[in-house]
Image (cartoon, helix red, strand yellow):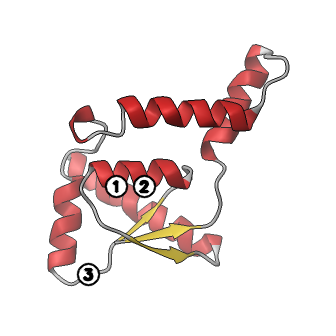
């Protein structure tokens, strides 16, 4: 499995947006992000947490068994992606993304696969 990875921005932008809306003074996105990940890794990035999509793991295994290339695209920071894949028991290798077009295509395909699985 490959991670297509360009930059880290997801949680910092999310937390910063919430802080801005709530009028938090002196907000430090890096400090908040660090604490967010401490909580996330401790409580949520666990095999028994139930955060995965039903059937997603099986889809990935079936695709790999048929010789298909499988990739993960995420706007989340690397630490969160690694934790989630590890909790799911998935091995990965990392390839750098040089084009957002490729990343956008991968996200669209993944979303369509997940919608199909929910049916």
The quarter of the picture where the N terminus appears is: bottom left
The quadrant holding residue 54 is top left
Disc 1 and disc 2: Cα gap in Å?
A: 5 Å
Q: Nearer the viewer, mark 1 or mark 3?
A: 1
Q: Earlier in the sequence, mark 2 or mark 3?
A: 3
Disc 2 + disc 3, Cβ < 8 Å: no
Give the labeled residue for mark 1: 85
Q: Residue 52: x percent and y percent?
A: 29, 43
Q: Residue 58: x percent and y percent?
A: 16, 59
Question: 33 above or below 10?
Answer: above
Q: Earlier in the sequence, mark 1 or mark 3?
A: 3
Q: Residue 59: x percent and y percent?
A: 20, 62
Q: Residue 73: x percent and y percent?
A: 47, 62
Residue at the location (36% across, 40% down)?
45
Is label 1 in a helix, a strand or a loop? helix
Give the labeled residue for mark 3: 68
Give the labeled residue for mark 2: 82
The quadrant holding residue 23 is top right
The quadrant holding residue 89 is bottom left
């Amino acid at each position: 499995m490959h991670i297509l990875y360009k930059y880290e921005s997801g949680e910092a932008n999310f937390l910063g947006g919430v802080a801005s809306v709530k009028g938090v003074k002196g907000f430090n996105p890096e400090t908040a992000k660090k604490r967010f990940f401490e909580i996330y890794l401790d409580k949520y990035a666990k095999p028994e947490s139930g955060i995965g999509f039903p059937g997603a793991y099986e889809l990935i295994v079936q695709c790999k068994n048929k010789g298909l290339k499988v990739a993960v695209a995420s706007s989340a920071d690397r630490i969160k992606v690694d934790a989630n894949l590890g909790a799911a028991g998935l091995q990965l290798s990392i390839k750098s993304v040089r084009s957002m077009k490729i990343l956008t295509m991968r996200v669209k395909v993944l979303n369509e696969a997940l919608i199909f699985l929910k049916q």
